[in-house]
Amino acid sequence: MNKETLDILMYKCHIPYYVAHKHIIPYTYLPQSKELLQDIHNYTQDIKLIEDTYYTRYNEFILLTDLLLYHGYSYSLNYISNSLCALLNRHIQLKRKGMIDLNNHIITITKSSKRKRTIKFIWGLMTPGERNEFINKYLIDNMTD
């Protein structure tokens, strides 16, 4: 970790030197698994593909709606499906939340000011296989119609 990054952690983020030195810096030198690196690579390629496609043909609301529909969410019923529940439970803060809490969370994060962030949040929780399936179902199938 270079001095600039350490300065940002200490002065801008108000993290004490000891915490940065003993608890953050050691993790920056650990090798990452091939699966994680492949997932990161897949995420960045696929999110760029969908944003380029959706934002030129449609808009962010349509993309978010399609992502939620892919996981079985119904806007009209405010119904959270088992698929979406399982997806959201992958997030550390939502791991043990029930259906009602997860439904309230979805209602909160689908506000217009948070759409792009929510899209990336949902996309990041999806596995590479789910992302591929979404792209095949919503992008490739729609381009051939």
Image (cartoon, rainbow, N blue to C red):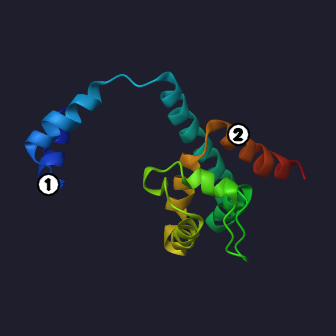
Q: CA distance from mark 2 to mark 1?
A: 40 Å
- Residue farthest along the right direction in this orientation: 145
On the picture, is 67 further left or further right than 39?
right
Residue at mark 1: 14
Residue 133, position as x, y percentages in the image: 74, 42
Type of residue at label 2?
Answer: Asn
Helix or strand or loop: what does disc 1 sit on?
Answer: loop
Tell me if residue 86 comes above or below residue 26 in the rendering: below
Q: Quadrant of the N terminus?
A: top left
Residue at mark 2: 132
Task: Pick whichever of labels 2 and 1 is earlier in the sequence.
Answer: 1
Asked if one can make out residue 3 in the rendered structure from this viewpoint, the answer is no
Q: Nearer the viewer, residue 82 or 120?
A: 82
On the picture, is 98 further left or further right than 132?
left
On the picture, is 140 further left or further right than 16?
right
Residue 112, position as x, y percentages in the image: 54, 74
Tell me if residue 66 comes above or below residue 75 in the rendering: above
Quadrant position of residue 127: top right
User: Which residue is depicted at the point 41% across and 25% down?
Assistant: 32
